[in-house]
Structures are given as structure tokens and as C-alpha cells.
Image (cartoon, rainbow, N blue to C red):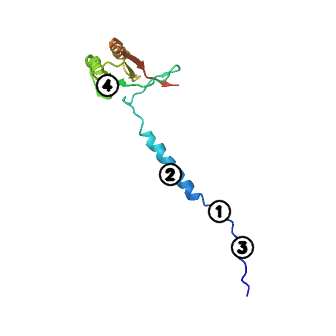
Amino acid sequence: MRLPEEPEIPPTINVTSLIDVTFSILAFFLFSTLFLTKNLGLPVNLPKAQTATPQPKLRYTVTVNAKGDIFLNQVATPLTDLAVQINRQRGAQEAVVLLQVDQEAKHGRAIAVLDRLRQIEGVRPALAVQAE
């Protein structure tokens, strides 16, 4: 007695689960890298500038909020102690200090902070703006 021959089914690879796993891993890495960024400043509304360029290797961030309060790396610091605090933290190394000033802050307060930063030897102040 002869049995009927079964038709040969071509071998296939089911990639649906492979695509699901790949997208899950991709989503994990996307979300985890969002938390790896380091922002030392406080959230302020920065003014816009067409000539804005990113500053490499920022070490310190001085923030002036809309009320005129001054923060060094998110720690409230009076203007009179700003130079002492920066010099204590940086030692003898040269440093770039990013100055973030809220656009609602008084102009005189921002200039006073910038003037104090320029008086510190070995410190290069940089102004933070948003690129248009």
C-alpha cells in the first residue's frame, strides 16, 4: 500500500517576535540615554541668539532665575560668595562657567553676575542662549 506523499513546505523564519524584541531593546536604550544627560542648571527661559554655539566640557553652571536669585550648580549662592565657591571647587584648574539668565531677570543683576565671573582669574564665562 502506498501512502500519499506530503507536499514539502518550504522552511520559513518567523521574524515577528524578533522584530518585537528588537524594538523593545531600542526603546529601552532610547529612554535610558535620556536620563544619562547631566544638566547642572535650573530650568529657566533662555533668550534666543542666531550666533549661539555649544560650549564643550562645561564644568560649572551659574543660574539667575526670574527673581534674581543666583545658583551655582543648583545650590543657592549669594553674589558675594560666588568667587569663593567657584575657586574652592575648581582648585588651580581653568574652568568654563556657563551663565544661564532667565529672560525675565533684571538686566543689572545679570551684568553684576557676569562682572563677578570675569573678575575670577582662570575662569571663562559663557552665556547660555537657545539657538533659533
Q: Nearer the viewer, mark 2 or mark 4?
A: 2
CA–CA distance in space, label 2 to label 4: 39 Å
**Residue depicted at x 52% and y 54%:** 21
Left/right placement of residue 25 relative to residue 35 reads: right
The residue tagged 1 is: 12
Indicate the secondary structure of the residue bearing disc 2: helix
Q: Earlier in the sequence, mark 2 or mark 1?
A: 1
Q: Position of residue 87 (x, y in %)?
A: 29, 19
CA–CA distance in space, label 1 to label 3: 15 Å
Indicate the secondary structure of the residue bearing disc 3: loop
As shown in the figure, which amino acid type bears the numbered disc 3? Pro
Q: Earlier in the sequence, mark 2 or mark 4?
A: 2
Q: Nearer the viewer, mark 1 or mark 4?
A: 1
Q: Earlier in the sequence, mark 1 or mark 3?
A: 3
Q: Earlier in the sequence, mark 1 or mark 4?
A: 1
Decide: few, some or many residues near mark 3? Use Cα within 10 Å; few <14, some 14-19, many ≥20: few
Q: Earlier in the sequence, mark 3 or mark 4?
A: 3
As shown in the figure, which amino acid type bears the numbered disc 4? Phe
Q: Which mark is residue 7?
A: 3
Q: Earlier in the sequence, mark 3 or mark 2?
A: 3
Identify which residue, 24 or 93, lies in the foreground: 93
Mark 1 and mark 4 residues within 8 Å of each other at the beta carbon: no
Left/right placement of residue 67 relative to residue 12 reads: left
